[in-house]
């Protein structure tokens, strides 16, 4: 817990997930002001939009914040340069290896924390200079790997020396405590922040998360190599039906990324892509970001205290 808080310069060992096309300056600054590390989730945004969001975030917080860059984005290269130009201190990455940008970022003094879904990528990125790693299990929402957080975190811990942040399946203090027991020094949260007051998604999307049960998520895109966990709805069912019928990849892609916008902006909960993790069933109310973070920390400490043998 100690070194990650020092590295991030935050009060709490909590970082916000990338939350592509959702995490703007409002959410990122709220998380940073609440004591965590807020992130601008670049997702599919272009470089100008990301630059704008960074500047806005600086107006709303004097606490550290970062940018999450989605490696599959056609704008990834431009955004990789924008974070250097705008003097962003911390970058997290997802959806692929950030290997080609590591030298540029390290030279600029940026703290680089990639998401890894496997031990092999963790070792590769540690060699390339990653400062810490976000080890994300398949319980997470959005684009996911195959392994569970429970299985993956200790295996990555045994393979690398950099501090680890556990992700996927963490919405409350019990899970945060469990992440520490697995060897992580910090946690990344995403799904629980969908129900934050400051989260700028349409209220229909928020309500869909509040209504979700344990079995409400499903994974689309396993056939295309880009598995995405979403809440079950028309779009997800249609996608899986089309995939079974062998519809072209480009058609299927249109159905997912385009439909994220439908959910986030328009609140179309039937035809939009409602990215959310398996913990959706735990989320029962809309709360301020600060309340969510304070409760995670306080409950995790309680749980850790209760579970000693002496
Ligand atoms: O990136 C995420 N979650 C995301 S990105 C996203 S936006 C999107 N929308 C439509 C299609 C695709 C993306 C929504 N949610 N989480 C982090 C994450 N990274 N999960 C898995 C990975 C990952 C996968 C492969 C990281 C590295 C990797 O490397 C492969 C290799 O060896 O290069």
Image: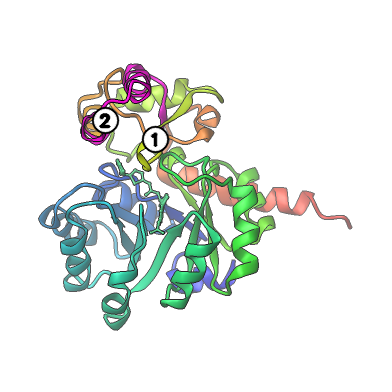
Q: Quadrant location of the N terminus?
A: bottom right
**Residue lying furthest bottom in this view?**
107
Magenta range is 228-257
For the point 41% across and 63% down, the residue is 114
Of residues 236 and 90, the one nearer the viewer is 236
Question: Cβ–Cβ below 8 Å for labels 1 and 2?
Answer: yes
* Number of numbered tags placed on the structure image: 2
Percent of width and height locating residue 5: 51, 68
168 within the magenta span: no
Give the labeled residue for mark 2. Answer: 252
Which of the labelled discs sits on residue 223, or is there none? Answer: 1
**Residue lying furthest right in this view?**
310
Which secondary structure class fits the magenta region best? helix
For the point 23% across and 51% down, the residue is 73
Among numbered discs 1 and 2, the one appearing first in the sequence: 1
Taking 101 as reference, is 34 above or below it?
above
Percent of width and height locating residue 111: 37, 73
Mark 2 close to ligand 1, CB under 8 Å:
no
Of residues 248 and 209, the one nearer the viewer is 248
Left or right side of 94 for 86: left
Taking 220 as reference, is 138 above or below it?
below
Which of the labelled discs sits on residue 67, or is there none? Answer: none
For the point 65% across and 51% down, the residue is 177
């Amino acid at each position: 817990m100690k070194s990650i808080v020092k590295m991030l310069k935050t009060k709490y060992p909590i970082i916000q997930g990338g939350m592509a096309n959702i995490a703007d300056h409002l959410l990122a600054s709220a998380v940073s002001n609440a004591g965590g590390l807020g992130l601008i989730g670049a997702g599919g945004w272009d470089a100008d939009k990301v630059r704008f969001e960074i500047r806005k975030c600086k107006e709303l917080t004097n606490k550290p914040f970062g940018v999450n860059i989605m490696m599959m984005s056609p704008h990834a290269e431009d955004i990789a340069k924008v974070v250097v130009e705008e003097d962003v201190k911390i970058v997290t990455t997802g959806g692929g290896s950030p290997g080609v940008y590591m030298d540029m970022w390290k030279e600029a003094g940026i703290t680089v924390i990639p998401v890894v879904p496997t031990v092999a990528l963790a070792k590769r990125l540690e060699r390339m200079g990653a400062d810490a790693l976000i080890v994300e299990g398949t319980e997470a929402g959005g684009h996911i790997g195959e392994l569970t957080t429970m299985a993956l975190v200790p295996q990555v811990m045994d393979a690398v020396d950099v501090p680890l942040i556990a992700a996927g399946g963490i919405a409350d203090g019990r899970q945060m405590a469990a992440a520490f027991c697995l060897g992580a020094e910090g946690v990344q949260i995403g799904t629980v922040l969908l129900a934050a007051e400051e989260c700028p998604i349409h209220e229909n999307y928020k309500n869909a998360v509040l209504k979700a049960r344990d079995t409400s998520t499903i994974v689309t895109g396993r056939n295309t190599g880009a598995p995405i966990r979403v809440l079950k709805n028309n779009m997800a069912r249609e996608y899986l039906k089309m995939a079974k019928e062998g519809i072209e990849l480009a058609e299927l892609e249109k159905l997912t990324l385009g439909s994220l916008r439908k959910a986030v902006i328009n609140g179309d909960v039937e035809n939009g892509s409602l990215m959310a993790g398996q913990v959706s069933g735990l989320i029962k109310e809309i709360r301020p970001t600060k309340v969510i973070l304070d409760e995670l920390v306080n409950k995790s400490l309680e749980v850790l205290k209760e579970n000693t043998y002496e």
